[in-house]
């Protein structure tokens, strides 16, 4: 809905907005506005009584004024009936609002062709207030008022055709607004401004109508015109004129204008930032009913910035804004309850409020729900649902959500990995998001779906590093070390690894350590290399002795050295590291760097299995006992260790146990283990089931 004018006229006694008087007062009353208020009403005509009622009101005697309004209405004066209806409609003169009586008196006045009553009856039917909504009936009343030369009815009918989806007709809206505009009615100027601004996307044309309405004193037009001058839409940016029109609207207590002024001081738009003053203005706007200002004021009370922290006040303000369907208020309340911020945590209520705000397409609520399902926070983790929520938030323009969608497609979180889909989202927010920039580097470096472009990858990695992303240093080091033959440059690789070390990146320590151990690009320095590699292990919470043992045992990164491997494995054994125990057992089993000793191998395998349930060691024990490798065959012990490994969900052990049992016609148990192995992804089990069963 647009910022429409009120559909109800104001009382003649309260403003200059009075229905046309079809029965002029007597010359005596007209020429003597200071008539004695004590005169007996029985001596006056109905018109004179109505004028006297106005004077009673102006002199602070609402009870006497109301009595005369009732008296003249009962005498059949249409203007009095219409204004008495409005008194009941808005609850004026000390009485409670009563729609039934308002409708009753409007109807009586309308039967006597009172245009104010016709327009207000139309409003009842348009809004479905007291009566069922009936737009056709509303249109009929507006048209009757128009036929009686009430141009304001043209404005109201124009807004109906502009705002109501069931009767939306821009041609009829424009025609009615133009009728009122000929009578220089500000509300019709405003209607034309809205029509051109929001429906025809012609801000330049709307600007002219806004200015006419604003200069005629319409507060909504003054506010909108101010924002146009501030934004420089359809005209050059002119803060001076913007402030001029904004102040005019503020003087009329236009709630959005007051709220905008608070924003100006809050964020320093065209004025020196003054958040304490902003809070005062937010307070005024909130009292006028501006929901956005309620939310902004609530955030100050929630945070305790510039005001004493007061969660109760914050929640009350959020609730008031939420009653106006302000989705951000719902989101902020949800956050307080879901996280238990200074209140008892209530995740159920938090989720309910997040969902309500999300159904109103609030991007922050959609994003917050996405993070909840992404992390499994008080709900079952659901990355697919999280991605859907992030996607909706991104479609609404939330930058945080762009990153989450791009990351999900890049890493395959809740969907299949697809860098082609990730690319546009990451590109959209790379300027201000270092990790998005880094991911772009990774995509152009080694994506399966996007054509590799090493120069682009380098550019994105360097930019990500300049944005503070330390991961990019090791990608650049890796790229220059071995990632691209055309870009091979050990000096640059070492330089980037050193930058990574400045940021305590584990991988940088590891790669630079290997270069020093191997003497590649630097003078060989085994001791320094080992120190760097040890730091890598500590940063990753690895057992450094086990990892160094593996380094020398496998010989993939440096020259294989079983003596060094044994040295570090034995140090790791003192720390009861099961991997070291298993691998050292393998050395004794095969005689690698030591004299072959099956009994020592069995002892080490047992330690590995018993310390931390190492299933590889269990499999090794089962092989030795079942095959009699260096020791007597012991089927019972072999099966025991094989079963233990299978029960630890080792798919290889499950396959071997299943095959062992099936080969011996233990069909049910064998099939059970074979199926478990296949379900765990073991290709040998899958192939066996396809071929044998």
Image (tube, rainbow, N blue to C red):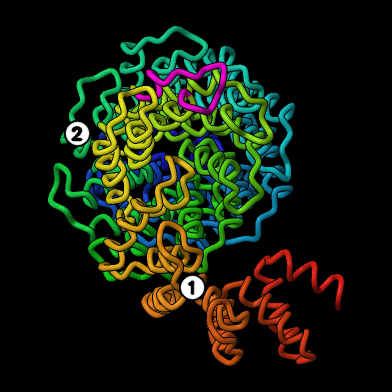
Q: Residues within 10 Å of mark 2 (few under 14, many from 20)?
A: some
Between 47 and 299, which is closer to the camera in this rendering? 299
* Residue 635, picture quadrant: bottom right
Query: Disc 2 or 1, which lies upstream in sequence?
Result: 2
- Which residue does the numbered mark 1 point to in the structure image? 617
Q: Is residue 622 above or below residue 52?
A: below
Instruction: Give percent across and percent down for residue 356.
Output: 51, 59
Identify which residue is drawn at 17% across, 49% down: 304
Q: Is residue 482 magenta?
A: yes
Q: Is residue 677 above or below residue 261?
A: below
Q: Is residue 410 magenta?
A: no
Quadrant the C terminus occupies: bottom right
Q: Residues within 10 Å of mark 1 (few under 14, many from 20)?
A: many
Instruction: Give percent across and percent down for residue 505.
Output: 32, 39
Our reading of the magenta stretch's main secondary structure is: helix
Identify which residue is drawn at 41% across, 39% down: 12
Q: Is residue 212 above or below residue 224?
A: above
Callout 1 secondary element? helix
The magenta span reads 480-494
**Mark in front: 2 vs 1:** 1
Checking the image for residue 275, the label placed there is 2
Callout 2 secondary element? helix
Looking at the image, residue 122 sits to the left or right of residue 217; the answer is right
Looking at the image, residue 671 sits to the left or right of residue 573; the answer is right
* Residue 503, picture quadrant: top left
């Amino acid at each position: 809905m647009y910022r429409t004018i009120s559909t109800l006229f104001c009382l003649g006694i309260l403003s200059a907005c009075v229905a046309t008087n079809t029965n002029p007062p007597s010359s005596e009353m007209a020429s003597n506005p200071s008539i004695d208020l004590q005169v007996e009403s029985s001596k006056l005509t109905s018109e004179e009584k109505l004028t006297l009622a106005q004077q009673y009101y102006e002199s602070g005697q609402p009870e006497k004024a109301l009595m005369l309004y009732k008296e003249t209405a009962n005498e059949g004066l249409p203007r009095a009936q219409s204004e008495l209806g409005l008194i009941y409609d808005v609850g004026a003169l000390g009485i409670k609002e009563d729609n039934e009586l308002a409708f009753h008196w409007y109807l009586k006045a309308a039967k006597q062709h009172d245009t104010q009553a016709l327009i207000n009856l139309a409003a009842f039917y348009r809004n479905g207030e007291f009566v069922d909504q009936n737009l056709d009936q509303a249109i009929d009343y507006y048209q009757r008022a128009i036929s009686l030369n009430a141009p304001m009815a043209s404005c109201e009918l124009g807004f109906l055709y502009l705002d109501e989806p069931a009767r939306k007709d821009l041609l009829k809206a424009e025609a009615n607004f133009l009728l009122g505009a000929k009578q220089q009615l500000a509300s019709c100027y405003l209607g034309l401004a809205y029509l051109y601004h929001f429906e025809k996307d012609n801000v330049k044309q709307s600007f002219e109508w806004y200015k006419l309405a604003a200069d005629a004193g319409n507060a909504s037009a003054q506010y909108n015109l101010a924002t146009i001058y501030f934004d420089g839409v359809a005209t050059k940016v002119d803060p001076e004129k913007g402030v001029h029109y904004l102040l005019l609207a503020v003087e009329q207590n236009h709630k959005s204008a007051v709220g905008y002024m608070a924003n100006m001081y809050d964020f320093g738009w065209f004025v020196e930032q003054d958040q304490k003053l902003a809070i005062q203005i937010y307070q005024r706007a909130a009292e006028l009913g501006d929901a956005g200002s309620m939310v902004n004021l609530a955030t100050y009370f929630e945070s305790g910035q510039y005001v004493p922290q007061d969660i109760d006040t914050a929640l009350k303000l959020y609730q008031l804004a939420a009653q106006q369907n302000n989705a951000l208020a719902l989101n902020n309340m949800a956050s307080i309850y879901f996280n238990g911020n200074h209140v008892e945590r209530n995740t159920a209520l938090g989720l309910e409020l997040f969902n309500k705000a999300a159904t109103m397409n609030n991007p922050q609520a959609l994003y917050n729900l996405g993070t909840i399902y992404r992390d499994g926070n008080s709900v079952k983790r659901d990355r697919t649902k999280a991605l859907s929520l992030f996607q909706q938030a991104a479609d609404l323009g939330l930058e945080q959500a762009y990153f989450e969608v791009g990351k999900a497609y890049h890493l395959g979180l809740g969907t299949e990995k697809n860098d082609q889909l990730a690319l546009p989202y990451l590109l959209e927010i790379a300027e201000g998001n270092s990790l998005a920039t880094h991911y772009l580097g990774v995509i152009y470096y080694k994506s399966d779906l996007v054509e590799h472009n090493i120069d682009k990858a380098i550019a994105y990695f360097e930019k990500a590093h300049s944005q503070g992303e330390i991961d990019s240093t090791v990608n650049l080091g890796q790229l220059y070390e071995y990632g691209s033959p055309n870009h091979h440059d050990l000096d640059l690789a070492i330089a980037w690894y050193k930058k990574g070390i400045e940021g305590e990146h584990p991988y940088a320590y590891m790669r630079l350590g290997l270069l020093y151990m191997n003497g590649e690009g630097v003078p060989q320095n085994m001791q320094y290399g080992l120190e760097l590699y040890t730091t890598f292990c500590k940063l990753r919470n690895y057992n450094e002795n086990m990892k160094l043992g593996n380094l020398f045992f496998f010989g993939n990164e440096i020259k294989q050295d079983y003596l060094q491997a044994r040295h570090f494995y034995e140090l790791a054994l003192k720390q009861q590291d099961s991997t070291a125990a298993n691998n050292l057992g393998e050395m004794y089993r095969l005689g690698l760097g030591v004299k072959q000793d099956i009994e020592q191998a069995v002892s080490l395998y047992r330690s590995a299995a018993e310390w931390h349930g190492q299933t590889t060691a269990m499999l090794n024990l089962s092989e030795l006992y079942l095959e009699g490798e260096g020791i007597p065959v012991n089927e019972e012990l072999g099966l025991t260790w094989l079963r233990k490994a299978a029960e630890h969900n080792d798919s290889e052990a499950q396959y071997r146990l299943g095959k062992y049992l099936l080969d011996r016609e233990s069909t049910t148990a064998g099939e059970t283990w074979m199926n478990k192995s296949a379900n765990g992804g073991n290709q040998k089990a899958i192939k066996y089931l396809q071929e044998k069963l």
